[in-house]
Amino acid sequence: MARTAVSGRLTWQVAAVTEIRQETPTIRTLALDVPDWPGHLAGQHIDIRLTAPDGYRAQRSYSISSAWTEGAKVELTVQRLDDGEVSPYLTDTVEVGDEIELRGPVGGWFVWRERQTSPVLLVGGGSGVAPLMAMIRQRAIAGTKQPFRLIYSVRTPEDVCFADELRRRVRDDAGLDVRYVYTRKVPDGWPEPPRRIDVAALNTHGWPPDFGVDCFVCGPTSFVETAADILVALGHDPRRIKTERFGGK
Ligand SMILES: Cc1cc2nc3c(=O)[nH]c(=O)nc-3n(C[C@H](O)[C@H](O)[C@H](O)COP(=O)(O)OP(=O)(O)OC[C@H]3O[C@@H](n4cnc5c(N)ncnc54)[C@H](O)[C@@H]3O)c2cc1C
């Protein structure tokens, strides 16, 4: 992979939206055709800049949810925040053929590299699953069999993003499994009531620290801080816990 993919290509450029997928009632994936994309690492993000006719600009970051292989599209998976400035535009207004100004890939810390061989514990809250999905997809492309587990905290079964693909991958990608923690509504017959991520959830669904686990935690800020604190309290090495905060409370 080109060195630029790691250090970040911080030049603004224009990309075309080539495909849009409605993942859940509030989340859409946009596939972008970015000229001369240098490739990216799973976990990196891009910056998007919108400019209004009067010159007013708004800029936000979005994780890349697609894995990288030669010729692949860059995909973003965006959740609409009803009172938000940028996300409603990306989830409701943008259409195939529109152009978006962006720069990237950005970030070299919150990344999973194919040469990492340790078991990986992914902990995602809401749209925080986006960069974790890129890691799951990249692992499949790399053909590695190291244990990967996703603990996915989500409001209701209808809000699960990538639901069909996750189901298929758990069946087909040896060594991958997914545990759900529903915060507002559980599926019929689910063995526990709705709950937020807590010590018991991470203790039950996670792996013991002596398993030599690399942890990636991503989602709204309070979710990330809670989950990372619990992982440390359970004995995980803080140097092996990487976090990405999406903002909000
Ligand atoms: C590195 C990075 C990667 C990101 N990747 C993604 C991604 O893959 N998908 C995605 O949907 N978002 C992602 N985000 C969040 C994204 O950048 C925006 O913050 C988000 O879309 C809200 O922007 P907005 O303009 O719609 O809302 P704003 O107008 O900025 O905010 C509206 C209200 O929502 C609150 N808010 C802002 N962000 C959040 C949040 N994440 N959760 C809850 N409340 C919030 C604000 O405090 C405010 O009250 C990422 C953020 C970072 C820093």
Image (cartoon, rainbow, N blue to C red):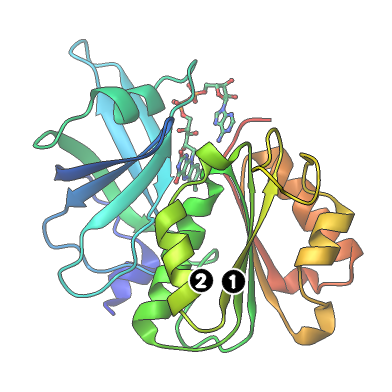
Q: Taking 113 as reference, is 200 above or below it? A: above
Q: How far apart are labels 2 and 1 at the CA level?
A: 5 Å
Which residue matches tag 2?
Answer: 170
Under tag 1, what secondary structure? strand
Residue 118, compared with residue 194, is above or below; it is below
Q: Position of residue 210 (x, y in %)?
A: 83, 85
Does residue 89 show up? yes
Say which quarter of the image contains residue 58: top left
Q: Quadrant of residue 122?
A: bottom right
* Local secondary structure at mark 2: helix
Residue ID for mark 1: 177
Q: Tell me the amino acid under the disc marked 2.
A: Val
Q: Earlier in the sequence, mark 2 or mark 1?
A: 2
What residue is at 47 percent from the left and 57 percent from the top? 131
Image position of 97 (left or right of 29) = left
The answer to whether 189 is drawn above or below residue 95 in the figure is below
- Mark 1 residue type: Asp
Identify which residue is drawn at 40% across, 60% down: 165
Residue occupying image coordinates x 47% and y 63%: 167
- Residue at 78% over, 51% down: 191
Q: Nearer the viewer, residue 109 or 86?
A: 86
Q: Which mark is residue 126?
A: none
Residue 25 located left or right of residue 124: left
Where residue 32 sits: x, y (%)?
A: 20, 49
User: Does the residue tagged 2 have its C-beta within 8 Å of any atom of ligand 1?
Assistant: no
CB-based contact (under 8 Å), mark 2 and mark 1: yes
Quadrant containing the N terminus is bottom left
Graded by Cα atoms within 10 Å as few (under 14), some (14 to 19) or many (20 or more), the crowding at tag 2 reads: some
